[in-house]
């Protein structure tokens, strides 16, 4: 896989939004699912899938969101653009100089905003309707929003397919005729049909072969440069995230535990959970000395979150205070926020 980009490679002069203000601003986002039992299906508890997420994304930026399966990444992303309704919180989207309250919109206003907020799904095999041709799949957003019809619609579909590396004649085929990488390109073309400014890529390469992964990642970066896109990139593969992201946010049990720029996170992580994730990354040199710190145990039940720091039952550095007091997400260094009582005091050896 190619080397990762540095933070300064994308200049703010190419960004479509105001440099001083984030394109997306998420505050206190929560999504709690009820636990119902008994014949009467009474609520006996809550699964706190997302529990107070704060996140900002600047225009033209790629923020990587990482963590183990079940930590709430996908739920958080779908709440941000209201594919599912959040329990609480605020999401502001800045468009045309106006801060739009995404969670407060209803009806036609929310439908109109969906032009700007699009989603690339993880599984290219289940996210495309097998009964529809590629032309109908890619054209569907344009038809729903009455952007084009007839010959103009076909021309737009052909242009979109070309932009993602497919041929216009592919539009008459069905999804089963394509490989996994080609299907994901179709999904990307569909997401870009309405020229959005913000795209959530939910593990877009995890179901693909390694050789195809690099092609799709390079395509996403090329499209970002060409169209001025802003990405929230969700993945559990930290190697992939390092390559595409300007900043990386680490999530555990519904909360962010660390967020900073990509280079700093990989060179100087400050949260024990991040230590463990990075130590699990494979290296090209089999003889290289490594400080491997495997995480003990499994992710706790989000319906029964441990007291204090939610990571303390699995943390090799936990102390008495960790089980009593919940740490806040605090800024340890400029632009480097960590949710740990002892952040900065624990030494990480890669």
Image (cartoon, rainbow, N blue to C red):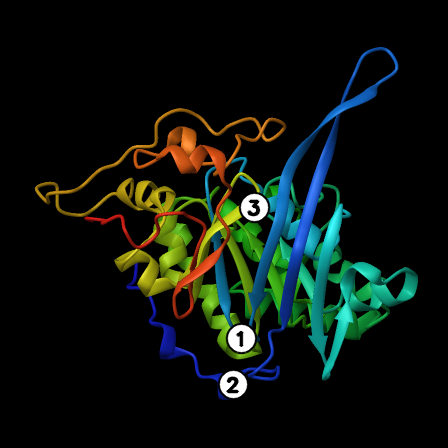
Residue 277 is situated, as x and y percent measured from the top left of the image, at 34, 42
Question: Where does label 3 land, which residue?
Answer: 73
Farthest bottom residue in view: 13
Residue 245: in sight, yes or no? no
Farthest right residue in view: 107
Farthest top residue in view: 39
Count neighbours of disc 1 (C-alpha within 10 A) and say few if under 14, some if 14 to 19, many if 20 or more: many
* Residue 3 appears left or right of 77: left
Question: Where does label 1 land, which residue?
Answer: 60
* Residue 35 appears left or right of 181: right
Task: Please tell me which residue is depicted at 41% across the width and 37% down the height of the picture.
Answer: 321
**Closer to us: mark 1 or mark 3?**
3
Q: In this view, does 35 lie above or below 163?
A: above
Q: Is residue 166 above or below residue 195?
A: above
Report if the CB atoms under discs 2 and 3 are less than 8 Å apart: no
Quarter of the image containing the N terminus? bottom left
Residue 67 is situated, as x and y percent measured from the top left of the image, at 46, 43
**In which quarter of the view is residue 17 placed?**
bottom right
Report if the CB atoms under discs 1 and 2 are less than 8 Å apart: yes
Task: Please tell me which residue is depicted at 75% across the width and 42% down the height of the picture.
Answer: 131
Q: Is residue 292 above or below residue 337?
A: above
Question: In what element is the residue under mark 1?
Answer: loop
* Residue 14 image label: 2
Relative to the observer, which residue lies in front, 3 or 56?
56
């Amino acid at each position: 896989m190619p080397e990762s980009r540095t933070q300064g490679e994308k200049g703010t002069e190419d960004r479509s939004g105001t440099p001083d203000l984030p394109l997306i601003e998420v505050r206190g986002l929560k999504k709690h699912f009820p636990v119902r039992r008994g014949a009467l299906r009474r609520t006996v508890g809550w699964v706190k899938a997302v529990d107070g997420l704060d996140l900002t994304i600047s225009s033209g930026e790629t923020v990587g969101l990482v963590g183990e399966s079940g930590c709430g990444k996908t739920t958080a992303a779908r709440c941000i653009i209201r594919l599912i309704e959040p329990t609480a919180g605020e999401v502001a989207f800045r468009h045309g100089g106006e801060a739009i309250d995404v969670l407060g919109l209803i009806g036609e206003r929310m439908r109109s905003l969906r032009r700007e907020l699009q989603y690339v799904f993880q599984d290219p095999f289940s996210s495309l309707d097998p009964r529809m041709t590629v032309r109908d799949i890619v054209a569907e957003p344009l038809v729903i929003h009455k952007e084009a019809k007839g010959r103009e619609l076909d021309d737009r579909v052909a242009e979109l397919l070309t932009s993602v590396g497919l041929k216009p004649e592919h539009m008459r085929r069905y999804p089963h005729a394509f490989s996994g990488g080609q299907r994901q390109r179709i999904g990307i073309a569909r997401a870009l049909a309405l020229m959005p400014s913000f795209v959530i890529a939910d593990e877009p390469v995890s179901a693909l072969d390694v050789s195809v992964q690099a092609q799709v990642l390079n395509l996403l970066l090329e499209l970002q440069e060409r169209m001025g896109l802003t990405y929230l990139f969700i993945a559990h593969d930290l190697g992939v995230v390092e390559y595409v992201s300007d900043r990386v946010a680490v999530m555990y049990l519904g909360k962010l535990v660390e967020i900073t720029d990509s280079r700093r996170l990989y060179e100087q992580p400050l949260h024990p959970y991040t230590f463990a994730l990075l130590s699990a990354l494979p290296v090209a040199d089999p003889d290289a000395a490594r400080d491997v710190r495997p995480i003990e145990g499994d992710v706790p039940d989000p319906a029964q979150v441990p007291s204090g720091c939610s990571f303390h039952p699995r943390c090799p550095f936990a102390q008495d205070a960790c089980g009593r007091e919940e740490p806040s997400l605090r800024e340890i260094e400029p632009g480097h926020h960590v949710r740990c009582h002892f952040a900065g005091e624990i030494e990480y050896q890669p």
